[in-house]
Image (cartoon, helix red, strand yellow):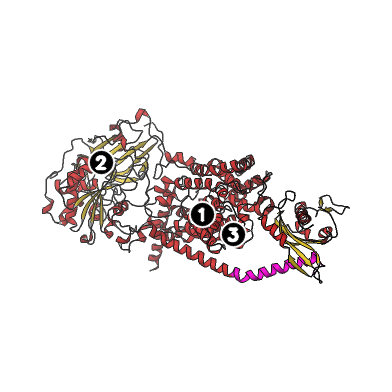
Amino acid sequence: MSGIYYQVSASPHVRNRLSTGRVMLDVIISLIPAACAGVINYGTRALAVILLSVGTAVLSEAAFDLIAKKGMTVKDGSAVVTGLLLALCLSPSVPWFIPVLGSVFAIIFVKSFFGGLGRNFMNPALAARCFLLISFSGIMTNYSMSDAVSSATPLASLLEDRAVNLTSMFLGSASGVIGSSILALLIGGVYLIAARAISWEIPVSFLLVFALFIGLFGGHWSDPSFVLAHLMGGGTVLGALFMATDPVTSPVTSVGMLIYGAAAGLLTGLFRVFATAADSTSYAIIIANLLTPLLDEFIIPKPFGFREQERDPDKESRPFTAKLLKPAVNLLLITAIAGIGLAAAFNVTKDTIAEQELKKKLQSYSSVLPGAETFEIDENSAALIESMQGSVYGTDFGRAYINEVAVGKDAAGGTAGYVISVTSADGYDGRITLSLGVDTEGVTQGIEFTELNETAGMGMRCDEPGFKDQFRGVDVERFTLNKAGGSTADDEIDSVSGASVSSGAVVNAVNAALDFLHKNIG
Amino acid sequence: MARKSFRGGVHPADRKELTRDAAPEIYLPKNQMIYPLNQHIGKPSVPVVTRGDRVLAGQLIAETSAFVSANIVSACSGTVKAVDRHRTIGGLFVDSVIIENDGLYEQAEGIGEKADYHAMTSEEILRKIMDAGIIGMGGAGFPTHVKLSPKNPGDIRFVIANGAECEPYITCDDHLMRSCAAEIVAGIDILLNLFENAEGVIVIENNKPEAIAAMKKAAAAYTRIRVLEAPVKYPQGGERSCISLVAGIDYKISQLPADVGCIVDNVGTIYAIYKAVCESTPLMERRVTITGDAVARPCNLITRIGVSCGELLEYAGGWKDGKQAVKMLAGGPMMGIAFDSLDVPIQKNNNALTFLTRDEVAESEKSATNCIRCGRCGSVCPVGLVPQLMAAAVEKKDFERFEKKLYGMECISCGCCTFICPAKRPLTQEFKAAKAEVMAIRRAEKEKEAARS
């Protein structure tokens, strides 16, 4: 004998070729159609976001590997998956630091700090998206490309009861995140299931429960295209096929997966219909992620020998559909019960909410046009507004929408002036809606906010008299924003310091209102 | 009722082409022969010879010492050199009878006498099987006469002859079925005499067409025996897989096949039963596949139990191109035992020696990652366990959860989960250790209990 030792280990002594790297490669392959569709639809901007996101993710993991001296785990390819997933749920118009910051957060804070691959308790890409949504709400929900005329996403239109183009949603040419082509996502999803990288339970129960919920409580139960539009919008498919199915953060057992998928679908529907957050799918999946350890703790199938011992052996070969029936019925029941409860709560409070809103509106109208006793809707303007079908007003005011024009009548019944309600979608944290009062001479009487969700201490300071009063008692065509402050001219508005985005949106909204008034009322 | 297949399972590369066409050769060992006293499940046998005794081939050298134990006979003639500890495949030094082989193969009296089993009572048949020292030859090594003595023989519905041979590389059962079909079928008929309500079913994976044809031909003469072709899937040859396939029954690890009306015996064991009962020949001989990419001439041997592995390797031409194997396995790569010295004897239950130039285990360790929770381990587990969660429990040393919640003790160590794992986690290995741990805890509790009362 040559004296060389023999290797000894416990059986088995052979291994399948499949490696973690190969599993990750399958996920990457499955995401390529969606990434390509994003680049085709949104151009090189999308490509830049994808490259930045993936590059930063890989570099972050490599850097952490070096610092933590854990060996180069970056080789397994999971950082590429995270970077790619994050990019696909970003708007193509985000500035460069968004994918960079997001990838660093995903890899370092969500993944590496919890022990790296397989140890994170939330999907890193989704957690990063949620982090960015909370920190940079305005940027994250701005889907306008530099030259796009309309930039409202299909989902935003849908939520405001406006028509959407299902074909462009399916192909991904509507405005939205980079990975919004349903066709490309479905191709990738089928590949994933065929490659056994994900199992069918999660996407099926997710989408089924979500569709049921939207159908039952979305308010358009008789319209299948409404449900379809909800399914295709808001990242639902991206979430159901690629985010919720992340094996690390979803349950291991088949029943666990069905419950988890149903929970994610239910929460998505719930947030979509009843909440006002900028995103529903991401938050729903993140919360469902938290259920995973619980489901894995308690939902454990019995081994085969414990399942069928007492059962009549002839009954064993139940058809597949029959086996599916029970969980399906259970899911339906859970959805129905949760939905009915919510709908009931919503209905009870709905009228009060509407009353409150009307009261708030009238109060704001009165305060911006003190000379008026009563208000009537201006019929001509109403028809005009209707004909605009909810599109952006003008080309000069950012994303401004005219909501309503009311005629203020004085005690004698004569016209005292006009109040215009206008919304800008360019606020730092979403929409800003305000009422502007103008008297019959064309002199502004002031503004009042009916919707303002800006950053406290910054954008919220638009609501202070020091800012609002600048819009009172002036007769101009339009205002300009002076970011430096210290204005002397009537048509110059001093920006709230540190909140030029919010201030700019207010000025744009007021200008849109003035423009509408001058063109249509005179 | 019968299923198309058991659930779960994997498809490792079968590598049977190395020896599929290697017709069995008879090899009579020339060197000393070694008989470890614990080569079966149960109590070790007690030697009945001492140093210097002259023994004949087929002579009893160690006898059964308990209900679950087995006889051992010498497979050669010669002189007892020692009764001493010797290295075994399992790596331990075990009390063994060591015989200096004189190469004459002089047989003990009465061997080869023909007998008609139809004229025998069940007790006589079982006695012959016990005297012959027959144990499960497929790998487990459970004493056959014990297995054939269930509480209620009338409750046995199936006698399953296991010729699945699902383990990669190995072809000795394939060749046995091809050349000795009549003897195997007669062996099954002997068992059917013990179990009057049973049906004989021969399970063969459908990648062995010659064996299937031969067995079908031989079984045609018997109304109570049929051949069942099984899909190729590891571990089809597992006792539970066979029962799942034939009877459509799953059972707990705490149950025996007989508890669910089944007796499962490897075809090699059944052949040995035939030889013992009808030809008065105790268990001296067995078939061994010598295979693997490190061996010069992969072959199938009909050889004598007790021969050293080194001698068989030498007969098979030694190392291919003079390059020593990196890993040596007794059995196949899925459940075989890795051993590190050629100076160990072939035991009754060793069906193959596999010599490999690569150690995939060491190689896979390099690409191991954290568990990615993909769930493949659960989908291939033939028992229906969730290995991913079991591994997580073991990692936390939560043996309570491993045993009670996750049914960890039901694991049959088939290796499917480890084989399939993309993260290259040593799951089966962890479970083996955890099961040993649970057994130790149980023992400690029992002792505590005993001390108290």
- Secondary structure at badge 1 equals loop
Say what amino acid the circle numbered 3 marks.
Arg
Say what amino acid the circle numbered 2 marks.
Pro
Local crowd size for mark 3, using a 10 Å CA cut-off: few (<14), some (14–19), many (≥20): many
The residue labelled by disc 3 is A272
CB contact under 8 Å: marks 3 and 2: no
Mark 3 or mark 2, whichever is nearer to me: 3
Rendered-image quadrant of the C terminus of chain B? bottom left
In the picture provided, is B190 more to the left or to the right than A188? left
Residue B125 placement (x, y as % from top left): 16, 53
Name the one closer to the observer, B29 or A420: A420
The reply to the same-chain question for discs 3 and 2 is no
- In the displayed structure, would residue A152 be above or below residue A353? above
Residue A146 is drawn in which quadrant? top right
Q: Does the magenta stretch mainly form a helix, a strand or a loop?
A: helix
CB contact under 8 Å: marks 1 and 3: no
- Secondary structure at badge 2 equals helix
Residue B95 placement (x, y as % from top left): 30, 46
Rendered-image quadrant of the N terminus of chain B? bottom left
Local crowd size for mark 2, using a 10 Å CA cut-off: few (<14), some (14–19), many (≥20): some
Is residue B129 found inside the magenta-colored segment of the image?
no
Say what amino acid the circle numbered 1 marks.
Ser
Give the chain of mark 3: A
Give the chain of mark 1: A
How far apart are labels 1 and 3 at the CA level?
Answer: 22 Å
- Magenta highlight range: A345-372
How far apart are labels 2 and 1 at the CA level?
Answer: 44 Å
The residue labelled by disc 2 is B209
- Secondary structure at badge 3 equals helix
Give the chain of mark 2: B
